[in-house]
């Protein structure tokens, strides 16, 4: 296995005059769960399509599992699994028929197929439902079947593009459990795009946030939160706040203290470690503590700080980009069809 599972350098994709992806760099190590966040239209899906060889970059380079996505797309496809937002499942097939077909398309022998289907049925917890028609499946079951189809050939890298969109909380948690198990037990590298911030926080070891086609921030969830601000302890009291303020300001680790009526706001680098010392300091004052709350920065704070009010503008840009992509695809198809017809006429 290569030293990096996914590498991108200056990766770009333009649709006409629109830069959907404007030169991003990635370096994801084998066995890592990498979360990819961004508002609608920021370039998440376009990036995934390029890394999965479904869309050709217009600039820069990228390699997946050691192979260049533009020069060796077939080699990349043999080593990746992909579960996109819309699961392309035939409702008239059974789950088992779909998985068996997928396995044969990847060249697995009959004995291997039977063994692999047994493993996958247990892995994604579909049980006897594998022999039911897909049209009878719930949304959560379809998602898990699509995940199984992406895993049938034991890929090195798994791309999950918003895998839990539209699922109920129970089904979402099941998918989360499967993602964790795949990474922990099988060592699969996972590239996860999602609009659920709590999903990225729960699953990803490292997160990249893309805004307007460029990566605006990257790091572990905890590191990204620390970049936005400090922890905040909020104390509501009964009594004279000045004495309480002086006691808190003398507590090691406190960065600042603000008083607003009966509410005291304390900023600290490590709020969880400071809760107890603050409580002890207040216990020696002539005040009654009504409640004490610790608030730490969230990924939502990070996301909003980076995207601001550009969310709607980016959504409009993506709609335009997608329209241009469809037009480009249609043109490519028409050109290919015309070429084939001319070749048949020449023969």
Image (cartoon, rainbow, N blue to C red):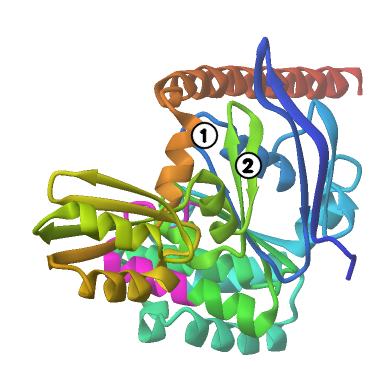
Please state the horizontal and vertical placement of residue 329, each as a whole percent of the image.
Answer: 65, 24
Residue with the most extreme left position = 238
Residue 141: name its quadrant: bottom left
Q: Earlier in the sequence, mark 2 or mark 1?
A: 2
Please state the horizontal and vertical placement of residue 205, each as a whole percent of the image.
Answer: 61, 65
Is 175 magenta? The answer is yes
Q: Residue at x 36, y 66 (%)?
A: 172
Q: Quadrant of the N terminus?
A: bottom right
Instruction: Say if mark 2 contacts mark 1, CB within 8 Å.
Output: yes
Where 44 sits versus 162, above or below?
above
- Tell which of 111 and 203 is nearer to you: 203
Q: Quadrant of the C terminus?
A: top right
- Tell which of 324 and 243 is nearer to you: 243
Whether residue 73 can be seen here: yes
Stretch in magenta: 161-177
**Tag count:** 2
Element carrying mark 1? helix
- Tell which of 317 and 149 is nearer to you: 317
Where 217 sits versus 176, above or below?
above
Q: Residue at x 13, y 50 (%)?
A: 262
Q: Residue at x 18, y 51 (%)?
A: 263
Whether residue 93 can be seen here: no
Element carrying mark 2? strand
Residue placed under numbered mark 1 in the picture: 306
Residue placed under numbered mark 2 in the picture: 217
Report the disc number at residue 296: none
Where 255 sits versus 118, above or below?
above
């Amino acid at each position: 296995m290569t030293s990096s599972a996914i590498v991108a350098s200056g990766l770009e994709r333009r649709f006409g005059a629109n830069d959907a992806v404007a030169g991003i760099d990635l370096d994801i190590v084998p066995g890592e769960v990498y979360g990819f966040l961004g508002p609608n239209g920021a370039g998440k899906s376009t990036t995934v399509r390029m890394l999965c060889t479904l869309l050709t970059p217009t600039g820069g380079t990228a390699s997946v599992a050691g192979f260049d996505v533009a020069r060796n797309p077939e080699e990349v496809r043999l080593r990746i699994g992909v579960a996109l937002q819309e699961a392309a499942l035939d409702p008239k097939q059974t789950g088992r028929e779909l998985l068996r077909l997928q396995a044969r398309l990847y060249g697995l022998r009959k004995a291997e197929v039977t063994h692999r289907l047994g493993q996958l049925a247990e892995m994604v917890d579909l049980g006897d439902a594998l022999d039911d028609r897909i049209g009878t499946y719930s949304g959560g079951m379809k998602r898990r079947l699509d995940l199984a189809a992406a895993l049938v050939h034991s890929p090195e890298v798994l791309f999950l593009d918003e895998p839990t969109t539209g699922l109920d909380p129970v089904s979402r948690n099941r998918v989360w459990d499967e993602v964790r198990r795949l990474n922990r037990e099988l060592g699969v590298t996972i590239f996860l795009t999602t609009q659920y911030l709590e999903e990225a926080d729960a699953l990803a070891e490292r997160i990249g946030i893309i805004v307007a086609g460029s990566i605006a921030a990257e790091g572990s969830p905890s590191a990204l939160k620390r970049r936005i601000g400090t922890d905040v302890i909020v104390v509501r009291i009964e009594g004279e706040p000045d004495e309480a303020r002086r006691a808190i300001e003398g507590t090691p680790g406190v960065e600042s203290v603000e008083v607003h009526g009966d509410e005291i706001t304390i900023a600290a680098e490590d709020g969880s470690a400071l809760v107890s010392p603050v409580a002890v300091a207040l216990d020696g004052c002539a005040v009654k503590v009504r409640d004490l709350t610790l608030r730490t920065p969230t990924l939502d704070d990070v996301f909003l700080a980076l995207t601001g009010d550009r969310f709607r503008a980016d959504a409009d840009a993506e709609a335009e980009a997608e329209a241009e992509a469809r037009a480009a695809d249609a043109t490519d198809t028409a050109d290919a069809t015309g070429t084939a017809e001319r070749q048949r006429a020449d023969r």
